[in-house]
Amino acid sequence: KREDAPAGAIRNVLIRDVIAHGKARSLLRGHPEQWLEGIRFDNVRLFLSSDAKAGYDKPGGAITLKYARDVSFKDVEVIMEEPTSKRWTAPLAVEDAADITLDGFRGTLPKGSASPAISLERVDGAVVRDSRAMAGTGTFLSAGEGVKDVVLMYNDLRAAKKATDGRSAKQ
């Protein structure tokens, strides 16, 4: 019987000064026993659209971060371009994570979307600062199940109908 090797570690990664166009959502996923750690995105613009004929169109955020700690998004913009998938949710969805910083984040939703710009589930500690709700944003931040210690500071939420729909965010 073969024993499975333990999950490897991905730590201290910097992705800087990137403009990318993609035909699918992006999944940044650690392992339940070995989380991503120390990941930094700085000055990144992602233009994401969907290819309905592709077999890889899965539900979730345009960018989904899962099983990660100490991750920062500084001056990151996610633009969900047409055509988008009806299965996609927020421009940024963070699940099972800790110590997340969004500094200067902007997420553009497709026209008529009811999804939040940022969705958090089971997140322990997040700071969202100097970020902006883009035109057409219903809810800027959704703080769902298991979210605690979220702080919103100096955000421009004038274009959002609601700042948050959760009970964990402090304005």
Image: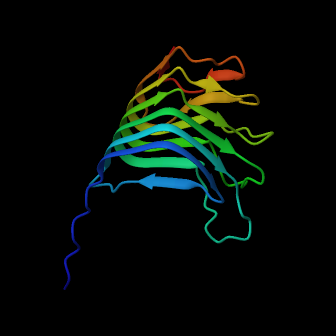
Q: Is residue 134 or residue 98 the one in the foreground?
A: 134
Considering every residue shown, the one lying at the far bottom of the view is 1
Residue 126 to residue 69: above or below: above
Q: Residue at x 53, y 14 (%)?
A: 154
Considering every residue shown, the one lying at the far front of the view is 17
Q: Position of residue 42 (x, y in %)?
A: 46, 36
Q: How is the image coloured?
A: rainbow
Q: Would you say residue 116 is visible in this rendering?
A: no
In-image side of 76 versus 116 (left or right) = left
Residue 117 to residue 167: above or below: below
The quadrant where residue 112 appears? top right
The N terminus: image quadrant: bottom left
In-image side of 127 versus 84 (left or right) = left
In-image side of 151 versus 7 (left or right) = right
Q: Position of residue 91 (x, y in %)?
A: 61, 42
Q: Position of residue 62 (x, y in %)?
A: 60, 49
Q: Residue at x 76, y 30 (%)?
A: 136
Residue 12 to residue 117: above or below: below
Q: Residue at x 65, y 47 (%)?
A: 47
Disc tally is 0
The quadrant where residue 38 appears? top left
Q: Would you say residue 111 is visible in this rendering?
A: yes
Q: Residue at x 63, y 59 (%)?
A: 24
Q: Position of residue 104 (x, y in %)?
A: 53, 26
Q: Is residue 20 or residue 34 the one in the foreground?
A: 20
